[in-house]
Image (cartoon, rainbow, N blue to C red):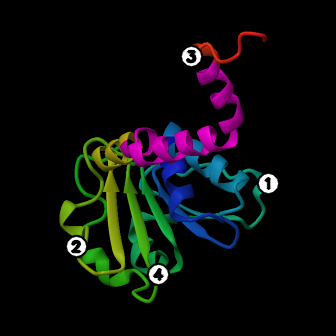
Amino acid sequence: DLCLDYLKTQCREFKNKRVMVIGTGTVGSGLVHRLLELGSDCEWCYHVNRPELQAAWGKRVTLSTFNDLPATLPKVDFVVCTAASPGHVLHRGHAPFFDQSKNILVVDLAMPRNVEPAMDGITSALKVVDLDGLKRWYRQEILDMAKVFELGRAVVHEHNDLYGKIIQSFQGGNKGE
């Protein structure tokens, strides 16, 4: 959920977006289902465990293997890594395979990490966010004091007449009410 909330802030519309999900376990499978519900097409990348494709998905999900990464990375808008791998699945050597003409976001949900940290910022178009980055983003989203104050001012402005009556009642100005 947190990953999808983050992706929604980065891309308001998922239709016509292609998301690569690397990993076929519970998290990877769940992401593919949810991304399809949001309107994305998926490139589902696996290493050993080939996932079963549902007939209802039609051509919206394409399977590929780790060996296919050089051919499939240029076709995607986002990558979400969830593989159970002891090492990095994506590393600096994969950076040239991304489409450099558009911004690419890579979200690493795996423990240990699937994405080599050196990939973040290797080009101006490539951004990597890991679990710690998602947690920082979430804390900022839920506790953005500027948003809290802005909302407070809007509520006070909207109900200014009621606040005036309340203040008068505390000051004894509404004795007859």
Residue 24 visible in rendering: no
Nearest to N terminus: mark 4 or mark 2: 4
Q: How far apart are marks 1 and 3 (CA)?
A: 70 Å
- Per the image, the residue denoted by label 1 is 55
How packed is label 2: few (under 14 Cα within 10 Å), some, or many (20 or more)? some
Residue 113 in view: yes
Residue pointed to by mark 4: 74
Which numbered disc covers residue 171?
3
- The reply to whether callout 2 and callout 3 are in contact (CB within 8 Å) is no
Which quarter of the rendered picture does the C terminus lie within?
Answer: top right
| N-terminal-most mark, 4 or 1 | 1
Quadrant in which the N terminus appears: top right
Q: Is residue 46 magenta?
A: no
The region drawn magenta spans: 140-168
At x 64% / y 16%, what residue is drawn? 169
Circles 4 and 1: CB atoms closer than 8 Å = no
| Of pointers 1 and 2, the one earlier in the residue sequence | 1
Disc 3 residue type (three-letter): Gln
Residue placed under numbered mark 2 in the picture: 92
Q: Tell me the amino acid under the disc marked 2.
A: Arg
Vertical comparison of 133 with 176: above or below: below
